Amino acid sequence: MATRPSYGSKPRKKPTPLDRAGLMSYSAKVLSVRSQTISELREKLKRRAAQADDVDDVLQRLKEMGYLNDERFAETFASWRRDNEGLGKTRVLRDLMARRVAPAVAKQAAEAAFQKTDEIAMIEKFLERKYRGKDLGALLGEQKHLASAYRKLRLAGFSSGNAIRVLKRHAAEAEKLEDMEDSSDPDQ
């Protein structure tokens, strides 16, 4: 049996460890591509640093210069996810925590971003976008589509109570969703 040549199987060369000036330059490049939390950038710098104590010095300098600020990052991130992606508060909070923002900072940013937001209106927009061009009443009349819509709303970060309220407007079967609710749901 003949073996096939393996393309791209060269072992990756480990990047050259960087000194403090190299870490600053690397940080600028990383931050120019995408905003980073302090924890995210710390992990990237640790992998590239020649000396571990240079990482904290670089991070401190970036904070002083205003390039790193988790509070500002969290506020911007929460507003962006709310306005442009139409996601709910729970999802935004979960995503901020996944990006390693401190829990207190993440919660404060999510609360501030959703303070004057009508969740019912957001849910309606979300359903319109997800089920564009379809008759929601007819579609949600089927139990499997109704359950799917409910799961999509919960995954998008909307509270179960408001999700059920909106779904009840479109389908009489939505009353059965209350049975699906987890009794330990914090949104009740």
Image (spheres, rainbow, N blue to C red):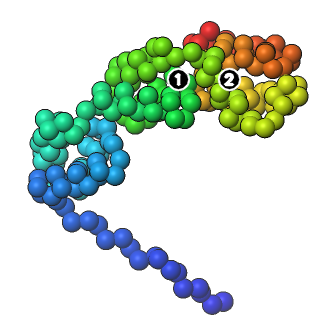
Sequence-first tag of 2 and 1: 1
Kindly give the residue lying farthest to the bottom in the view shown.
2
For the point 14% across and 38% down, which residue is it?
A: 65
Seen in the image, is 163 located left or right of residue 81? right
Q: Label 2 crowding class (10 Å Cα cut-off): few <14, some 14-19, many 20+?
A: some
Kindly give the residue lying farthest to the front in the view shown.
133
SS class, disc 1: helix
Q: Nearer the viewer, residue 34 or 100?
A: 34
- The answer to whether residue 168 shows anywhere in this view is yes
Q: Is residue 85 above or below residue 157?
A: below
Seen in the image, is 156 located left or right of residue 164? left
The numbered mark at residue 124 is 2
Contact check, label 2 and label 1, Cβ < 8 Å: no
For the point 56% across and 30% down, which residue is it?
A: 86
For the point 65% across and 27% down, which residue is it?
A: 125
Seen in the image, is 15 located left or right of residue 115? left
Q: Residue 3 lies in what quarter of the image?
A: bottom right
Q: Residue 66 lies in what quarter of the image?
A: top left
Q: In the picture, which quadrant includes the C terminus?
A: top right
| Three-letter code for the amino acid on which mark 2 is drawn | Glu
Q: Is residue 161 above or below residue 35?
A: above
Location of residue 6 in the rendering, given as x and y in whole percent from the top left corner: 52, 81
SS class, disc 2: helix
Location of residue 159 in the rendering, given as x and y in whole percent from the top left corner: 61, 17
Location of residue 89 in the rendering, given as x and y in whole percent from the top left corner: 51, 22
| Three-letter code for the amino acid on which mark 1 is drawn | Thr
Give the CA separation, mark 2 to mark 1. 17 Å
Location of residue 22 in the rendering, given as x and y in whole percent from the top left corner: 15, 58
Kindly give the residue lying farthest to the top in the view shown.
188
Q: Label 1 crowding class (10 Å Cα cut-off): few <14, some 14-19, many 20+?
A: some
For the point 78% across and 38% down, which residue is it?
A: 133
User: Where does label 1 land, which residue?
Assistant: 90
